[in-house]
Image (tube, coloured by chain):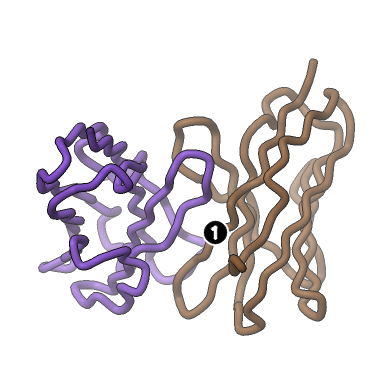
Amino acid sequence: RKEVEQDPGPFNVPEGATVAFNCTYSNSASQSFFWYRQDCRKEPKLLMSVYSSGNEDGRFTAQLNRASQYISLLIRDSKLSDSATYLCVVNRDDKIIFGKGTRLHILP
Amino acid sequence: GAGVSQSPRYKVAKRGQDVALRCDPISGHVSLFWYQQALGQGPEFLTYFQNEAQLDKSGLPSDRFFAERPEGSVSTLKIQRTQQEDSAVYLCASSFDSPDGYTFGSGTRLTVV
């Protein structure tokens, strides 16, 4: 079993819709949590950190549930430019561990 | 430089050939990481340096893989006797002191033929 599990998708979503991704992690010693975005043939880039209290950055909302070892990302009012792979990431022992990624296609 | 620089951008190697991939991190970044990303997969951790010390090499898939960072700045990932399964994008990331600050290079796409 992978340490960080994500539904690979693809999620095909009409422009303007709301979409949510989930991720689970297996190691309870994981210390911090992130969502990264990766465009085709590009490097991953940090989208946002994830906190237990929940945090929001514009149309993006991230949530962490430590008890269930579960992380989520919500995208509201999706744009064509949101099409990408979203990588769930945990930090454990000073290294970051990636999930396989969830592919999102926003349809015009 | 302004970002993490990796070279070469693309490398085609014949099976059995040795290759060396270079990573030039952001100046002053203490931590440096190497990841391997196969097509359709997330990046897989290979190894991690803090300054010149290699603190974790648990992700290196075999003893054909070797990484160094002798002066705590530039790092080289060497793969000996390349095999087809080594074909992947090799990503380097650096950070000052926290995972919030990870910056990735554009990667080296290695194709073993």
Quarter where residue B84 is shown: top left
Specify the quadrant that holds the C terminus of chain A: top right
Residue A103 x, y percent position in the rendering: 67, 38
Left or right of B81 in this view: A81: right
Q: Chain of mark 1?
A: A
Describe the element under mark 1 as helix, strand or loop: strand
Give above or below for A32 relative to A59: below
Q: Which residue is mark 1?
A: A98
Quarter where residue B34 is shown: bottom left
- Colour displayed for chain B in the image of the structure: purple
Towards the viewer: B60 or A66: B60
Q: How many residues crowd mark 1 within 10 Å: few (<14), some (14–19), many (20+)?
A: many
- Colour displayed for chain A in the image of the structure: brown
Left or right of B9 in this view: B42: right
Quarter where residue A12 is shown: top right
Residue at image coords 58%, 51%: A100
Give above or below for B66 relative to A68: above
Give above or below for A26 relative to B7: below
Towards the viewer: B14 or A94: B14
Specify the quadrant that holds the N terminus of chain A: bottom right
**Residue type at tag 1:** Phe
